[in-house]
Structures are given as C-alpha cells and as structure tokens.
Amino acid sequence: MIKHIKTKSIDRFIESALYDKKFGYYSKHNPFGSKGDFVTAPLISPLFNEMISIWLISFWIKIGKPNNFAFVELGPGNGALCQTLCRVSKNFPEFERSIKIFLFEKSKKLIKIQKNKIDNKKVFWIKNLKDIKKGPVLFFGNEFIDSIPIKQFKAIDYRIYEKFIQLDRQRFKKFIFKKIEKKTLKELNNLGLLRKNGVIEYPKEGLKILSQITRIIKKLNGGVLLIDYGYLNDQGIDTLQSIKSHKKNIFYKNIGKADITYLVNFKLLKKFFKDKKLSLNKIVSQNFFLKRLGILERAENISKKMSFREKSKIYFSLDRLLNEKKMGELFKVIFATNLKKKIDLGFK
C-alpha cells in the first residue's frame, strides 16, 4: 500500500482529527460562540452556570461543609462556568475558603482562552486526574463524555466487525470492517453492548477516564455529575455527528476544521457506575433538572427590573435550554456517588 494511505480505527481517527498537535480541531480553533462552530449550555445562559454553582454548594453543605473540597470541571470549554462559580462563591465565604477548583483540559488553545477569562487563585489547571490529592471531590462534566473518541462496530447475525476508516492524504477513501478479537468481544459482552444486528458504539477511552474518576471518588469520597446529550434506549444506530459553523458536517470531511461528537449511551453509564458499586439517582432530563433547581424562579426574579429586550434575551436562552424539542429532553443528567447520604437535589 502506498505510504500516504492510512487506515485508522474510528476512535484513533477522531482522536487525531480533534487533538492532533498540528492539525487537530481543538489545537487550532476556538469552537465556541457565534463565531465558532457550536454553543454549549454555559454559553447559552449564565443561569445554567448559576444553577450548577448552587447545586455544587448544596452538595458541599449536604456532606458536612468539609474544609478541603475539590471541584473538578471536566472539559471546561471557554471557562464560562468556572467564571460564574468564582463569582457566586463570593456570596458564600465559608464555601469559598474551602474549595479548590481544578480545570481538566488537554487543549493548549482552550487553556489559553480559559486563563484569559479566569483570574482566581483558587483555580488550577491539570492534565492528569492523579493531581487530585485531597477530597471530598465533585467531578462535573457538561458535554465532556461526547468529546472523547469512541470505537464503532457492526453486528451482522452476532458476528462483530470493527469499523476502520481509510484516508489518502487526509481525505476520506473508504470504510473497512475487520473481525474483532475475543478480548474485545468479551469487553462488549461484559458491558451489555452485544446485539444481533446494527451499530455498536463503545466509548472505551471514556470509560477508562470514568474508571479513574471512580477510583478517586472511592479514595477521597465524593461524586460525579454529568450532563450530555444522549439516549436511554440503544437503537443500534450510528450516532456520530459533526458540526461546522453551526451546521451539520459529514464527520470524515473538513478534518481538523469541524467538531466530532456522538450521542451518549446513558444506559451504559448507569450499568458502568452500578458495576463500580456507586449509588445513582434516577437519570433525568436537563429540563427536569434545571427546573427543580429553580431556574425559572431565578429568571423571573432577575428580570423584574429589566427592559423588554433584556427579558426577551433571557427567556430566549431558557427556551433553548428547556424546550423539549431543543436541549431540554435530549440532554440527560446522571449523578453517581460513593456517599451514603441521599443527594437528590434536582433529581426528584
């Protein structure tokens, strides 16, 4: 085969397309906002960030107001949520004295953007979760899991083949399917991912990171709160998707110039955390979670003295977050902990 033709598994392809130091999407671009390619909840409305901050403070109170409390934001985007948390914390001096904020980020480009936005001695940037030495600790990720590359397989009458992509000078050539090894077959079986026919998506790297997070939680005490777009019932379909300039893009085109994500399998996350012996709340929608935290009451309160234009802006952003046909139902919320105390704020 000619040297410039390369064959990669889907996860290796996504990894290089997003994180390659020379041409990777997150190495070169600021993907967020109207001038970027997509907008996440922390950028849509500061009210989202306030609700997460209040949930975090409530969690801290519920576990006894520990003097050393670590908050780890997984994939902090442009730093908007952390910025809000620092502001809200000032209203709770005891909490502010207790907390240390760790931003887990691998993109040098995004770290630079975050540091330009955040100036607080309580905030530290880490590239390795082993740097978390003291707890209790709360991990939080908004659209974090969907940013980690996944493997894809094709099932035909229970025969499982891994999907590979062939590139010629960074341009798509064709897909190739290879029969998987017994070790991989066993992994899929243990996770309950095997099916007779259809597409199997396996977030192998994501589960590795969650395994590390679980070990830290068990060692230091705490929990993990994840919000992402995904599903509860596996349909066996290809959920890989790509966005460029707020429009859909074929994931193997515009390599290094577009984001690549997928829908998160929350049924798999539930099984994973249960297998790790963590306690879980019921998985709820973003709509349910934010409303239970009081986002509508907060919006009503702050909009009383606003102009019609300012009010319209607030409720337009709320519609994006809560509308069932937009982010409201598509985004799910899961919380797992090793603590025996019932922490159900936002989940009942």
Image: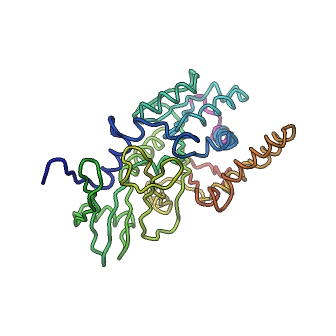
Quadrant of the rendered structure where residue 98 is?
top right
| 62 magenta-colored | yes
Residue closest to the eye, 320 or 244: 244
Residue at 27 percent of width and 67 percent of height: 161
270 left or right of 286 in image: left
Which residue reaches farthest left? Answer: 1
Residue at 32 percent of width and 64 percent of height: 153
Which residue reaches farthest right? Answer: 305
The percent position of residue 109, horizontal first and vertical second, equals: 44, 31
The percent position of residue 333, horizontal first and vertical second, equals: 58, 54
The percent position of residue 125, horizontal first and vertical second, equals: 47, 28
| 205 magenta-colored | no
Residue closest to the eye, 39 or 292: 39
Residue closest to the eye, 173 or 148: 173
Residue at 57 percent of width and 27 percent of height: 117
19 to 204, vertically: above or below? above
Residue closest to the eye, 127 or 117: 117
Which residue reaches farthest bottom? Answer: 157
The percent position of residue 148, horizontal first and vertical second, equals: 41, 48
Picture quarter with the N terminus? bottom left
100 left or right of 153 in image: right
267 left or right of 192 in image: right
Picture quarter with the C terminus? bottom right
Report the magenta residues as a range: 58-68
> What color scheme is it?
rainbow
